[in-house]
Each structure stands twice: as structure tokens, then as C-alpha cells.
Image (cartoon, helix red, strand yellow):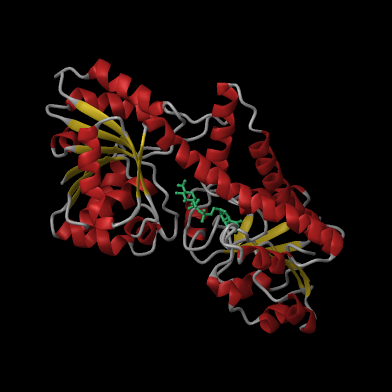
């Protein structure tokens, strides 16, 4: 099929690339000339395992191309995905101005029937506005349909998630569009949920909010564990075997970050408020998550007594492993809190440091070449991202390098009994 994807962020670039991999002809459009330049030179604007190889293959086989011209993209496609950013405004509401702009640009360039697919995460009723915007700018008076087709991929496993979806949601009120979308997604062989546009939009927000709720729930349980001496890791295991609960997203720690959960949660709370419903439950999810970050600083303080003048080593900057993304990462807030108290900060992240340095995401920190360099003469080591290489550290070497063997683990990656045996003061989500 002939496809155009507008927006080459995580969702747009991965969706376009994977659809090309399935044999479709895909044109990816972005207004950012630097990004398109980078992609045309064969380089990736984001770090995502496996992406580069598939992009190269599909470009070489002429199924995938990049352009800044939306007219070119619209001309070359029957299905147009809108995958532009919906960043949070000051008050937490989603900023939909990019979506509106793209809808207008698509409409102005349409010369034949098109399906316009909402791929970006958007508030309920956005589909209606997209349809309205296209209608009033549809100067060639061509037929079109709007579809909501939310994305569920995770950063770090984006290719796998896109190629092996657990479900595909199609929101539409057009039988014609439904038939074409079913055809497009047939090769994925995944359960397909066809519904109205509004329900599809809410499925996305509800899914992210539910997952965030699971994390805040287990984090709340970890607070009870701290007060009683119970073990949150074992509790999560004991709960997770119940198939109604499930094991996933029950890892307690320093809280969730990234560009999706915090932003989407906030946006969902706002939409509900606008619709006249106070989504108290989600406000609590957000509050617990904020508290988890503050709790990390408190644990460090409890272990060191005075923070001022101490050297604190941070292992992990990205909001989760296998990505260099630091947007809304717990590391940013926690480092700032420690700096406010007068700590000297050393950091290491296997992938995210380059972006952190280039975009000046952190002020006054010492970037180190590895975890051992961070540990050298540190008063305390703090784990904020569960990269595999941190799980395999030579902890005796770490202990020897440190001024004071204190490890505060925001991701529960070590065995507390083993740490005690090694003479390391170890604090994790239950302590
Ligand atoms: C999330 C959803 O999982 C995707 O389904 C969705 O498509 C995406 O948002 C989006 O809306 O675009 P992502 O933000 O890439 O994906 O990352 P997750 O793996 O969901 O992790 C989010 C945060 O939760 C991370 O900071 C992670 O460390 C934290 N987390 C996750 C926990 O603290 N505990 C857990 O048990 C699981």
C-alpha cells in the first residue's frame, strides 16, 4: 500500500519503517530539515535498538524515503498517518497545534480519496476536530475518512513491539476505511479491535493510565514495606502469578518517567476535568510518583546525614534502559534536589550521556567513563536506571573505590543479603 507518515519521532519513524519492512511504500515527512537531512544521510535521530538496520534496508530497497514536503508525501499515499508531537502545555493539557497544522496541510494537498490516521496520542474528540479541519480546508473537495489508530510501542523495544503487536485498535465510522485498515494490518496477525473514533482515543489514554497506576500501586506498597520490613520484590512476585493481576509493571522504585506516562496521565486528568469528571484516582497515581522521587533524596540523606559537600555518584540517566531518552526522567529531578542541597554529582549512563551533554540537560555534573569511575571517591552511589551492565558490576571493586560504601538502589537490581555480606550499606524500595 502507499503510505505517508507525518512526524519522524519515535512513533512516526518506527511505524513508517516497520510498515515499509512489510512491503508497503512509505514516505516519512517532517518539517525539521535537520532531522530529514540526518535520515537522508542514513543516520538515526534517535537511539533505538535495531532501527538503523531496518531503515537502511528499506531505503536501499526503495520502499522508504524521507522528505520535508508534505505535498510530496500526501501525493504518494492513500493512507496518511499523523504522528506529530502532542507536548504538554503549562497546565498539563496536550498541545494539539501540530496536529491541527498537519491536518490542514494534508487537506490542502489532497487530490484523491485519503484515509487520515491519528497515530499521535490525543485527547478524546480530537478525531472530530481533525475531520472538521480537513473538511474546511479540503479545497479539491475529495472524499476522505479519519481513523484513530493508537500506538502501544515502548521505547527501547519499539521495533519488536510494532512487529509483534498484542492488539491493533482501529477507530472509525467508515466501512471503506475499516476494510483498507484491516488489509494494511493483516500481516501482523494480531487481535483487531474495531470501534468508534472516541473509544479508540480513550483506549490509548486508559491503557497508559492503567499501567502508570500499576506502578504507583506497587510503589505505595513499597512504602508499607518500608514501615514494616516486608519485601516489595517478593510481594510483587506473589501478586504477579495471579493472571488477573499479571507480573508486568509491578517493579517498585524511583517512579516512572519518559515522555508518555507523565504527559499522558496529566493530559487524561485534564480532559476528564474539562468533561466535568474529577479523576481522583489518577491524581493519586501522579502524586505517588512525585513522592517516589523525593523519597530517593530522603533515603540518601538518611544514609549520609549531611548532603552538603558530599560526592554522590549516579548510575543511569535515561528514564529506562535501552534508550537515550531523558525526557521526564527521574534522574533529572533527583539530581537537581541533591544539587540544591549542595552535593557534588558524578554520573554515568551507557547511552544517554551524549544527549545529556549535547542538550545541556544537566548542569554542573561530572560525566564519567564508566560505573567504576563514578564510584571512585563517592560517598554514595545511586542506581536510577536498570541497565544490564549495572546488574553485572564487580561490586567489591565498586566498594573499594568508594569513600563510603553506600548504595541507594532506585530499581531494586541487587540482592540485599549479598550486599550486606559484602559490607555495603544497601537501601532499596523496601528499606
Ligand atoms: C509507554 C507504554 O508502555 C507504551 O505501551 C506506550 O505506547 C508508550 O508509553 C507511549 O504512550 O508512547 P514507554 O514510555 O516507552 O512506553 O516505557 P515503559 O516501558 O512503559 O516505561 C515507562 C516508565 O515506567 C519508565 O520510567 C520505567 O522505568 C517505569 N516503570 C515501568 C516502573 O517504574 N516500573 C515498572 O514496573 C515498569
Q: Quadrant of residue 135?
A: top left
At horizontal 57% and vertical 60% (from top left) the residue drawn is 246
User: Residue 338: x, y in percent?
Assistant: 73, 52
376 sits left or right of 367 in the view: right
Q: Nearer the viewer, residue 42 or 51?
A: 51
Residue 260 in sight here: no
User: Residue 289: x, y in percent?
Assistant: 67, 47
78 sits left or right of 262 in the view: left
Q: Is residue 84 above or below residue 257?
A: above
285 sits left or right of 115 in the view: right
Q: Nearer the viewer, residue 172 or 231?
A: 172
Assign the C terminus to one quadrant of the image: bottom right
At horizontal 30% and vertical 27% (from top left) the residue drawn is 103
How many tags in the picture?
0
Q: Is residue 34 above or below residue 249?
A: above
At horizontal 67% and vertical 38% (from top left) the residue drawn is 281
Q: Quadrant of residue 284?
A: top right
Q: Nearer the viewer, residue 319 or 190?
A: 190
Q: Nearer the viewer, residue 322 or 33?
A: 322
Residue 256 in sight here: yes
197 sits left or right of 217 in the view: left
Amino acid at each position: 500500500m502507499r503510505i505517508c507518515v507525518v512526524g519522524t519521532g519515535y512513533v512516526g519513524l518506527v511505524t513508517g519503517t516497520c510498515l515499509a519492512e512489510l512491503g508497503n511504500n512509505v514516505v516519512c515527512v517532517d518539517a525539521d530539515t535537520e532531522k530529514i537531512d540526518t535520515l537522508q544521510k542514513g543516520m538515526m535521530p534517535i537511539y533505538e535498538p535495531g532501527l538503523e538496520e531496518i531503515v537502511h534496508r528499506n531505503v536501499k530497497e526503495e520502499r522508504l524515503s524521507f522528505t520535508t514536503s508534505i505535498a510530496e508525501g500526501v501525493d504518494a499515499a492513500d493512507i496518511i498517518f499523523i504522528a506529530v508531537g502532542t507536548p504538554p502545555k503549562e497546565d498539563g493539557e496536550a498541545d494539539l497545534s501540530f496536529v491541527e497544522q498537519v491536518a490542514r496541510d494534508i487537506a490542502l494537498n489532497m487530490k484523491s480519496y485519503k484515509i487520515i490516521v491519528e497515530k499521535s496520542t490525543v485527547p478524546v474528540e480530537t478525531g472530530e476536530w481533525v475531520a472538521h479541519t480537513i473538511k474546511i480546508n479540503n479545497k479539491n473537495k475529495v472524499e476522505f475518512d479519519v481513523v484513530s489508530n493508537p500506538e502501544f510501542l515502548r521505547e527501547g523495544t519499539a521495533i519488536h513491539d510494532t512487529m509483534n503487536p498484542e492488539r491493533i485498535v482501529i477507530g472509525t465510522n467508515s466501512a471503506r476505511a475499516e476494510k483498507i485498515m484491516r488489509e494494511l494490518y493483516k500481516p501482523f496477525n494480531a487481535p483487531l479491535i474495531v470501534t468508534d473514533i472516541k473509544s479508540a482515543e480513550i483506549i490509548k489514554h486508559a491503557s497508559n493510565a492503567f499501567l502508570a497506576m500499576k506502578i504507583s500501586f506497587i510503589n505505595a506498597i513499597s512504602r508499607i514495606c518500608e514501615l514494616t520490613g516486608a519485601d516489595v520484590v517478593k510481594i510483587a512476585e506473589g501478586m504477579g502469578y495471579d493472571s488477573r493481576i499479571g507480573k508486568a509493571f509491578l517493579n517498585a522504585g524511583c517512579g516512572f518517567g519518559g515522555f508518555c506516562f507523565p504527559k499522558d496521565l496529566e493530559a487524561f486528568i485534564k480532559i476528564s476535568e474539562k468533561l466535568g469528571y474529577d479523576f481522583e484516582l489518577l491524581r493519586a497515581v501522579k502524586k505517588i510518583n512525585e513522592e517516589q522521587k523525593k523519597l530517593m533524596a530522603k533515603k540518601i540523606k538518611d544514609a549520609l546525614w549531611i548532603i552538603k559537600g558530599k560526592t554522590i555518584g549516579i548510575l543511569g540517566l535515561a528514564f529506562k534502559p535501552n534508550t537515550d531518552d531523558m525526557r521526564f526522567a527521574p534522574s533529572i529531578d533527583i539530581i537537581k534536589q541533591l544539587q540544591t542541597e549542595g552535593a557534588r554529582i558524578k554520573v554515568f549512563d551507557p547511552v544517554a550521556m551524549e544527549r545529556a551533554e549535547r542538550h545541556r540537560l544537566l548542569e554542573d555534573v561530572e560525566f564519567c567513563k564508566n560505573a567504576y569511575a563514578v564510584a571512585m571517591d563517592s560517598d554514595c552511589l545511586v542506581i536510577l536506571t536498570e541497565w544490564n551492565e549495572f546488574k553485572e558490576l564487580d561490586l567489591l571493586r565498586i566498594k573499594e573505590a568508594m569513600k563510603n560504601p553506600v548504595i541507594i538502589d532506585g530499581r531494586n537490581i541487587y540482592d540485599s543479603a549479598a550486599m550486606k555480606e559484602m559490607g555495603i550499606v544497601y537501601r532499596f524500595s523496601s528499606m
